Image (cartoon, rainbow, N blue to C red):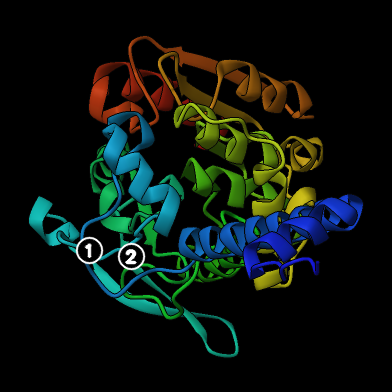
């Protein structure tokens, strides 16, 4: 009596059982390939601005369903625009385009002071624009400073459509500083930055030979890999190996080494006086990370922690405390 032929599912099951190790290797390869495709897409969405839509909320603000959607499709990062100008605050200003490299120009607002004792360049954070620094610029102006507010590449009125979380933005800082020195020759130059802007300042000093009279920075992260891991922690997800893959693929997409993007290393090259400000309720950058950057700074430094302030403008939440620290710093190091 002949054995009845196996159905296709039965034949497949028998083959899989007979070749268990080959099956396992194939499944692992497929899983690894899928994971790489997923992280590649997420790295792209985190560093390329979209044409519109609403910006994805912070991880801790997302519902469970919204988190699932973000995990599936990635974040939406609309290209930052400027909704206000210095004129809205009663400040006279001029608009300038600053060349960086071929194809990249930065839009900047120059707000002169009649008798400036300091020139301050201001640099915004990730997914932001120079108009978010208008309140600080007005306060610097009140303190006797001329100011230059700069849109990083991809933001506001600048060209480009990508962000590298401070890597190529370091070159933007260097170009802005050359322009600022031309506008205010002989006046001490101080650099102010928030988050990514702080990181770009540190990189410009370390890699582009920028030599300011002082820097004032808020909430700088210490290592790119660490700050990517924080996003997974905020989503209540394990970071390994996805954080590593995100940094790797982001580097591939932009022709850089994301694992070497470590402000804690850049800080060792900073010899000018530094004022570092940070909120003790920052969910993006832990106080210990900022402390590591502070410890690495070679020059005179002052570290101020703002109570009940998150990853945001220290001035907006505590303008009195911010102005006090900044005025004292400028009086000691820039006038």
206 left or right of 329? right
Query: Can you say whether 311 is above or below 7 in the image?
Result: above
Task: Compute the Cα span from label 1 to label 2.
Answer: 15 Å
Local crowd at mark 2 within 10 Å, few (<14), some, or many (≥20)? many
Q: Residue furthest bottom?
A: 102
Q: Which residue is mark 1?
A: 82
Residue at 37 percent of width and 35 percent of height: 59
Residue at 46 percent of width and 65 percent of height: 152
Examine the rendering and report whether any part of residue 123 can be seen: no
Residue at 24 percent of width and 30 percent of height: 316
Query: Reading the chain from its start, which is encountered first: label 1 or label 2?
Result: 1
Q: Which residue is mark 2?
A: 110
Instruction: Indicate which label's residue lies in the foreground, 1 or 2.
Output: 1
Residue at 74 percent of width and 29 percent of height: 297
Q: Residue 255 in the image: x percent, y percent?
A: 73, 72
Could you tell me how many numbered marks the image carries?
A: 2
Residue placed most toward the observer, 284 or 70: 70
Query: Can you say whether 90 is above or below 106 in the image?
Result: above
Q: Residue 272 in the image: x percent, y percent?
A: 70, 37
Query: Can you say whether 213 is above or below 277 in the image?
Result: below
255 left or right of 275? right
329 left or right of 87? right
Quarter of the figure with the N terminus = bottom right
Q: Residue furthest top?
A: 307
Residue placed most toward the observer, 159 or 335: 159
Which element type, helix, strand or loop, lies under badge 2?
strand
Residue 150 falls in image quadrant = bottom left
Which element type, helix, strand or loop, lies under badge 1?
loop
């Amino acid at each position: 009596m002949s054995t009845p032929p196996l159905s296709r599912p039965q034949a497949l099951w028998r083959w899989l059982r007979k070749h268990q190790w080959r099956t396992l290797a194939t499944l692992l390869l497929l899983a690894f390939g899928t994971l790489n495709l997923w992280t590649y897409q997420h790295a792209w969405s985190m560093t390329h601005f979209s044409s519109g839509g609403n910006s994805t909320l912070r991880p801790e603000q997302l519902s469970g369903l919204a988190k699932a959607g973000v995990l599936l499709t990635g974040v939406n990062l609309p290209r930052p625009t400027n909704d206000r100008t210095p004129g809205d605050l009663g400040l006279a200003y001029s608009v300038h385009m600053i060349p960086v490299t071929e194809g990249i120009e930065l839009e900047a607002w120059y707000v002169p002071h009649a008798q400036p004792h300091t020139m301050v360049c201001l640099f915004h954070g990730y997914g932001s624009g120079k108009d978010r620094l208008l309140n600080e610029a007005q306060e610097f102006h009140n303190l006797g400073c001329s100011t230059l507010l700069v849109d990083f590449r991809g933001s506001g009125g600048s060209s480009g459509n990508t962000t590298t979380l401070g890597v190529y933005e370091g070159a933007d800082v260097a170009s802005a500083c050359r322009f600022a020195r031309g506008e205010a020759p002989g006046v001490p130059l101080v650099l102010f930055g928030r988050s990514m802007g702080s990181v770009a300042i540190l990189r410009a000093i370390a890699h582009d030979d920028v030599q300011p009279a002082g820097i004032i920075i808020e909430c700088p992260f210490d290592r790119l890999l660490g700050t990517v891991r924080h996003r997974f922690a905020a989503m209540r997800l394990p970071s390994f190996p996805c954080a590593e893959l995100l940094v790797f693929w982001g580097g591939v997409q932009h022709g850089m080494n994301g694992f070497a993007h470590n402000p804690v290393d850049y800080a060792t090259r900073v010899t000018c006086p530094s004022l570092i400000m940070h909120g003790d309720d920052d969910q993006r950058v832990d106080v210990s990370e900022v402390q590591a950057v502070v410890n690495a700074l070679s020059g005179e430094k002052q570290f101020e922690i703002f109570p009940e302030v998150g990853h945001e403008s220290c001035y907006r939440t505590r303008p009195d405390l911010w102005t006090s620290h900044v005025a004292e710093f400028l009086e000691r190091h820039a006038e």
